[in-house]
């Protein structure tokens, strides 16, 4: 084990002094654990991920591209992009406000507030969608009033946006709160004492420090917003070409046995997930380099 | 004045006000509507909905498969976390990065992909079929989907806990003649026990509410392969809002129970660490 790490002399020396490190039992346990880990991940993660691309490209690259010419698929991609373009900026502003209030100040009930912000993570996506049907659906609390004024929220764009916002609500705040708490208030207090305004302090002192964490929070929020299925499925009403987002379009194509089409849309979302993971790793590296 | 400690920093009113307003409008008010909808039912009507045979069948599958998935994740989560923390091998970094994939991958994608792999003619399903193991469209498939989507919770909770295991103690135990298994049971297991239980609860809580990845691989047969979230959707599609709300409240209660358990476990862990420090 130690021999595989020529660049790390301290670890090598450390390992050499450990008892029982070079016995054959240790070698077998090591081999068994690595094999089991790889087998588990290969069966549950790598095989499904490879299937996405294998099925999408099963009839060749041309058929793959043609599946994006379908007007309903295009409409689904447009709807997903539009929803994300509204939801992610709103949740980003919320995340910044919440982390400033929570990390910079001491007040009563702070832990309750943090728990409430995290609440959507603990709730089934079906329930996240259902609450808006109960509020704005035809038989819901405001249903009759909305109908009189000819307003549609459920089975229309506003409902999809509300459900997506609910589900992705905590993501930016969750990244920023611990980061800002860890960074402390000293620099901000110095800036204010020296006469800088509140906004100037935020943009010139705080924002540069938290930009990597903010970026990751936004990317994660974006991935969840584009991929949300359960909550959006409940409020969308599945009107083809109108209220179907990308994940819902995947379901429709899949149930019609249009596997190339379904997996072609799925391949876009898989690539998005891949990009999200790459950004996560880059952010972690940047943070480690920054020492923050 | 006693609500918050004085500070030279500005912006508390603005950010706190915006946070509470947005939180109330998007999260708290809609959740209150759910509880009110269920509360407006007659008690007997509520009980009839939440204890109907079909509902009971769905709890059995949802809670049973989630508990099984969380247990599988405790075992494999430990093995994977141990492998990532203790061993160096080619591809370790890639394995580490891949663990987060179920977080980032949309559930509909993991649902159709898992079903395709484990279907009768799928890459893995074709080798299981001669053995008489049917995964797709059975409770086994439900468990598999729930295991996949809740796996990162177990690994990511166990990893930092394993890093904290004092290897000096392990070494001392071995030097003093303790067997590997004895050292594991007396030194490693007690240290990571809170993390194991937290990982189990987090996995379970995530799995119980899951919808997207399960409905593709489950057969969705009432009483057999129908999960509770799907039963809620069926009630909603029939415009039976009260029935859906009643089942929703049962699931919400389970979520709160899960959150409470996690908080208690973390408090227990903090107390243990404080004691260990003294």
Image (cartoon, coloured by chain):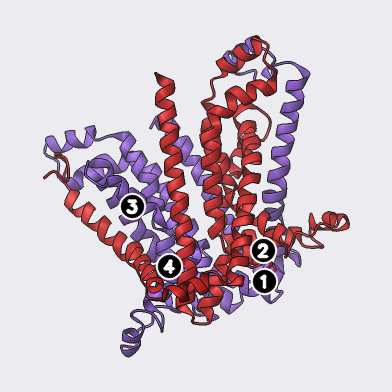
Chain colours: A purple, B red
Distance in Å between CA atoms under marks 3 and 2: 33 Å
Label 3 neighbour load within 10 Å: few <14, some 14-19, many 20+: many
Q: Quadrant of residue B208?
A: bottom right
Distance in Å between CA atoms under marks 1 and 2: 8 Å
Whether residue A121 is situated above or below residue B57 in the rendered picture: above
Secondary structure category for the residue under label 4? helix
Looking at this rendering, what residue extends furthest in the bottom direction? A148
Q: Are marks 1 and 2 in contact (CB under 8 Å)?
A: yes
Q: Quadrant of residue A36?
A: top right
Question: Which label's residue is closer to the chain start, 4 or 1?
Answer: 4
Distance in Å between CA atoms under marks 3 and 1: 36 Å
Q: Where in the figure is residue B82, as x and y percent of width and height?
A: 62, 31
Residue bearing mark 4: A163
Question: Which label's residue is closer to the chain start, 3 or 1?
Answer: 3
Q: Same subunit under labels 1 and 2?
A: no
Q: Are marks 2 and 4 in contact (CB under 8 Å)?
A: no
Residue bearing mark 1: A254
């Amino acid at each position: 084990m130690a021999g595989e790490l020529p660049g790390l002399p301290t670890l090598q020396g450390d390992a050499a002094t450990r008892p029982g490190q070079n016995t054959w039992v240790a070698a077998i346990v090591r081999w068994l654990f690595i094999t089991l880990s790889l087998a588990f991940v290969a069966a549950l993660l790598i095989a499904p991920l490879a299937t996405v691309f294998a099925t999408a490209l099963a009839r060749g690259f041309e058929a793959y591209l043609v599946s994006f010419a379908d007007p309903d698929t295009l409409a689904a991609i447009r709807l997903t992009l539009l929803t994300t373009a509204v939801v992610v900026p709103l949740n980003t502003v919320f995340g910044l406000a919440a982390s400033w209030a929570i990390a910079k100040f001491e007040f009563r009930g702070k832990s309750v507030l943090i728990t409430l912000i995290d609440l959507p993570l603990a709730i089934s996506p079906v329930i996240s969608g259902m609450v808006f049907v109960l509020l704005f659906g035809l038989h819901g609390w405001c249903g009759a009033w909305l109908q009189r004024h000819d307003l549609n929220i459920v089975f229309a764009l506003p409902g999809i946006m509300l459900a997506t916002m609910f589900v992705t609500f905590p993501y930016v705040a969750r990244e920023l709160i611990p980061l800002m708490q860890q960074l402390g208030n000293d620099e901000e207090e110095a800036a204010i004492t020296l006469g800088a305004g509140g906004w100037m302090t935020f943009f010139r002192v705080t924002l540069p420090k938290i930009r990597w964490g903010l970026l990751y929070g936004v990317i994660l929020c974006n991935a969840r917003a584009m991929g949300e299925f359960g909550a959006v499925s409940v409020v969308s009403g599945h009107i083809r070409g109108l209220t179907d987002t990308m994940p819902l379009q995947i379901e429709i194509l899949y149930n019609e046995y249009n596997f190339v089409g379904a997996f072609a849309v799925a391949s876009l979302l898989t690539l998005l997930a891949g990009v999200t993971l790459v950004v996560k790793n880059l952010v972690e590296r940047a943070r480690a380099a920054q020492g923050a | 004045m006693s609500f918050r400690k004085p500070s030279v920093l500005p912006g508390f009113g603005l950010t706190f006000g915006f946070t509470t307003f947005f939180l109330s409008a998007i999260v708290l008010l809609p959740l209150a509507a759910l509880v009110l909808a269920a509360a407006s039912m007659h008690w007997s009507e509520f009980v009839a909905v939440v204890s109907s045979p079909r509902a009971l069948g769905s709890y059995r599958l949802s809670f049973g498969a989630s508990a099984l998935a969380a247990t599988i994740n405790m075992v494999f989560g430990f093995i994977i976390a141990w492998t990532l923390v203790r061993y160096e091998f080619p591809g370790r970094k890639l394995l580490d990065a891949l663990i987060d994939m179920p977080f980032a991958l949309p559930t509909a994608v993991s649902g159709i992909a898992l079903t395709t792999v484990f279907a009768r003619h799928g890459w893995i399903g074709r080798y299981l079929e001669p053995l008489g193991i049917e995964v797709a469209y059975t409770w086994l498939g439900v468990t598999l989907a729930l295991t996949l989507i809740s796996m990162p919770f177990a690994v990511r909770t166990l990893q930092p806990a394993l890093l904290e295991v004092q290897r000096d103690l392990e070494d001392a135990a071995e030097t003093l003649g303790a067997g590997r298994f004895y050292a594991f049971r007396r030194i490693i297991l007690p240290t990571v026990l809170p993390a194991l239980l937290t990982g189990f609860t987090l996995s379970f809580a995530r799995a119980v509410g899951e919808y997207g990845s399960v409905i593709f691989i489950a057969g969705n047969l009432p009483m057999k392969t129908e999960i509770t979230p799907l039963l809620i959707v069926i009630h909603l599609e029939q415009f039976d809002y009260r029935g859906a709300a009643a089942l929703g409240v049962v699931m919400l209660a389970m979520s709160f129970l899960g959150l409470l358990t996690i908080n208690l476990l973390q408090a227990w862990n903090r107390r243990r660490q404080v004691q260990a420090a003294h």
